[in-house]
Amino acid sequence: MAEAKSDPFAMPNAQSILGMDPSQLNETFRSMTQKSMEQSKEAYGRMKTAADEATKALEATMENVHQGSLQLSKKAIDAMRTNAELGFAHLDSMMSAKSFAEVIEMQTAYVRKQVEMATDQAKEMQTLTQAVAQDMMKPGRDAFQKATKGK
């Protein structure tokens, strides 16, 4: 009786290689693919939400920068106008001086007033600049706090 010899070049079947039924392999692959797609959609949704929030924060920041810049410009223009008007008024009053001593007295009072006014204007600009900086940073700070609370 002749014994059946096994073919050493024959391909083994899928069940013997994987240790599972090939029909189950399709279902497993489909399940993994579906789970991967769901995770990708969730990740995309989180990225889109984060990008939208970052865009809103940037837009709000830029609007605050614009408004703050306008406020600072107006304050600087008002200070220059006040200084110019005071200078012209001083020159006008100098024309009516009757003596050199009166000119020195007027000039001294003018310089003292200019120094006081410059100090006050500098304080006002500093206060306004700090307020503008706080307003400018608020949208970014709020977005950061929101993002860190979500974790």
Image (spheres, rainbow, N blue to C red):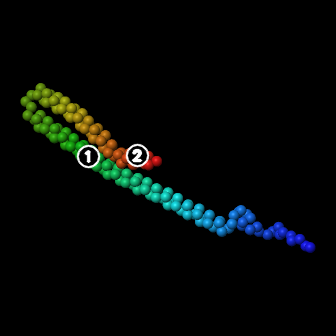
Mark in the foreground, 2 or 1: 2
Residue 8 in the image: state x and y as whole percent: 82, 67
Task: Name the element at disc 1.
Answer: helix
Residue 110 in the image: state x and y as whole percent: 16, 32
Which of the 4 image quarters holds residue 77? top left
Query: Which residue is under mark 1?
Result: 71
Query: Can residue 144 be seen here?
Result: no
Q: Amino acid at mark 1?
A: Gln
Q: Is residue 2 above or below residue 53?
A: below
Q: Nearer the viewer, residue 94 or 125?
A: 125
Label 1 neighbour load within 10 Å: few <14, some 14-19, many 20+: some
Q: Is residue 107 left or right of residue 36?
A: left
Query: Which residue is under mark 2?
Result: 145
Residue at the (43%, 46%) spot, across then down: 149
Residue at the (69%, 66%) spot, across then down: 21
Q: Is residue 123 left or right of residue 18?
A: left
Q: Amino acid at mark 2?
A: Gln
Label 2 neighbour load within 10 Å: few <14, some 14-19, many 20+: few
Residue 24 in the image: state x and y as whole percent: 65, 66
Residue at the (91%, 73%) spot, across then down: 2
Residue 143 in the image: state x and y as whole percent: 39, 49
Which of the 4 image quarters holds residue 105? top left
Quick one: label 2 or label 1, which is nearer the N terminus? 1
Q: Is residue 15 above or below residue 101?
A: below
Task: Name the element at disc 2.
Answer: helix
